[in-house]
Image (cartoon, rainbow, N blue to C red):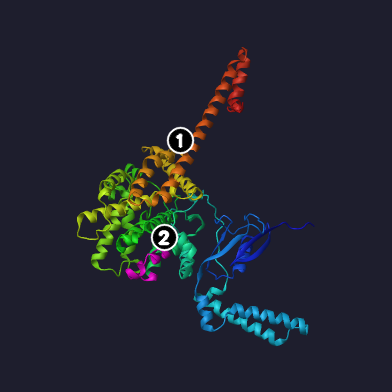
Amino acid sequence: MHDMATKIIYFTVNGRPERAEFPVDCPAQDVKDLFRAAAEAGPHDILKLYNPRGNIVNISLSLEPNSPNSRYKLEVVAADCNSAEIAGALGFDLFSMEKRLQGLEKKILMEASETPAVVYEMKKQVDSFREKLESVEHLSWLGLFKDLSDGTHKPSPFYHKRTLHKTRKECEHVREKFLQMSSLQVSEEVRQFLKTPTFDNWQWEDAEIMVLLQVMYTDLDFIAAFNIEPEVLQQFLFEVYRRYNNIPFHNFKHCFCVTQMMYGLIWLTDLKSKMDSIDLLIMLTSAVCHDLDHTGYNNAYQINARTELALRYNDISPLENHHCAVAFEILEKTESNIFRNVSMDQYKRIREGIIKCILATDMTRHNEILNKFKSILPAFDFNNRDHRDVVRREQKTVLMMILIKVSDISNEARPMEVAEPWLDCLLQEFYNQSDVEKLEGLPVTPFMDRDKVTKPSSQTGFIRFVLLPLFIELANLFPCLEQHIIDPVRKALDYYTEMEKALEREKQNRAQSENAAKSKETTVGPQSPADSHTDAGHEASQPDAQSTV
């Protein structure tokens, strides 16, 4: 018999040092149970574990062992506020009562050497009371925290094994989790982090993402300003989630990233003081809806393959028109219409604005929109709030279009550990399209061809000729964006330029090795026909034999 190998993790919770020890081969759920017990959190509370560098890490068997000097930090980042309210209403805190009872029990045991029947009776009553509270759904804060996935930054390689559209079971599971979490109070730290371009989307599940989207609508004061009922917002967000497909890139997480960047830009540029609240509502909702029901094939494919969408929209931005139409399908249902309490004039303005913003995300219109923005930039005037002023209206509309464009293609403005996995997802979707184009005999989209495009080559040109010119123009209007989005993009360009050079050097080295191998072959002396035949046969059976030289 030998001792079972264990892993020791040091962490703090509420500033209190803790030490967790578990076998290296124990079930993942046991590890999570250990941490949830330490946090004393509610059943649907959201917990996150931070490493010493401040990055969120998954609570799983793969946690790196550490020392007491480099503790992880366990935090409840979204908690049900009911627990404090109920404790106040009851006049006591059940946890405190239980601890007090345990203390008394220990004291009696030491003094009387056995536990009196009255203590057992008290324990029984506490357990019974706990059971009653936990059986009432909205009071179930006494349990332990939600399940966290063991996901990593890597994009899933199994998209092809999933159905394109989400299954009913998948949707209901996420809906249930979201509704259980929807009343959580998200911590101030996360609320502030949500306003920055450095936010890491990879550590949040779909139900949690819906909670964060709810926070955005709340913190921008849309709930009060446009009389949006919480249950209607929740139904709207669920319907949006349901209509994003299981594809590598243009999925619900992408919807969140674009919306979160838009939200960050609104706060960074102080747009709340510069634009009407209704315009901010248009921009945020456009970001949420901008890729609804995307199937992973771009407009060029839709048009060349003469798909139903291309035929319906006469080859004019078929995808963007479809995303827009699906958005208003959701908004046509009373139970998910977040605009149902606005006036007729406001609704007309919202609908017109959302259509313009979503249609602006068609990249074939990129130069047209950017040139229009450049032309109005010198005369841009935030002080003019007159809605009847045609110039003012035009300026505002173009700015809104630019902001959603920037948000839509902003991944490279994020930290590399967040941005690079998104590029892997995008290339996965691109390569899939070019494979299908080849199979169907359609024109192959050059920048999607896996035989011609590499990871760095896909980015260097895009950053240099599309991203930077767009971001620089926006920073001309808002200089504060230089450090927040332009500096990271320049770093990304340097990173992919270096990667491209390294690949080129590798290619040259390989070519030199092959040439050396060939010249070595030519130095071999003359052979008999029989020997030549034998060597040729050997070479044919081992085509790569020379490449190892």
Residue 380 shown in magenta: no
Q: Nearer the viewer, residue 52 or 159?
A: 52
Amino acid residing under circle 1: Asp
Tell me how far mark 1 sits from mark 2, CA to CA: 34 Å
User: Residue, x 38% and y 44% (percent of image)?
Assistant: 467
Asked whether residue 455 is in view, the answer is no
Residue 30, label in figure: none
- SS label for mark 1: loop
Q: Is residue 57 left or right of residue 423?
A: right
Q: Which residue is mark 2?
A: 242
Residue 226 shown in magenta: yes
Q: Label 2 neighbourhood size at 10 Å, few (<14), some (14-19), many (20+)?
A: many
Extent of the magenta region: 214-231
133 is higher (above) or lower (below) than 400? below
Q: Nearer the viewer, residue 107 or 202?
A: 107
Is label 1 in contact with label 2 (beta carbons under 8 Å)? no
85 is higher (above) or lower (below) than 332? below
Residue 487 spot, x, y in % from top left: 43, 46
195 is higher (above) or lower (below) than 516? below
Q: Which residue is mark 1?
A: 451
- SS label for mark 2: helix
Residue 441 spot, x, y in % from top left: 38, 37
Q: Nearer the viewer, residue 448 or 74?
A: 74
Q: Is residue 453 left or right of residue 523?
A: left
Q: Quadrant of residue 516?
A: top right
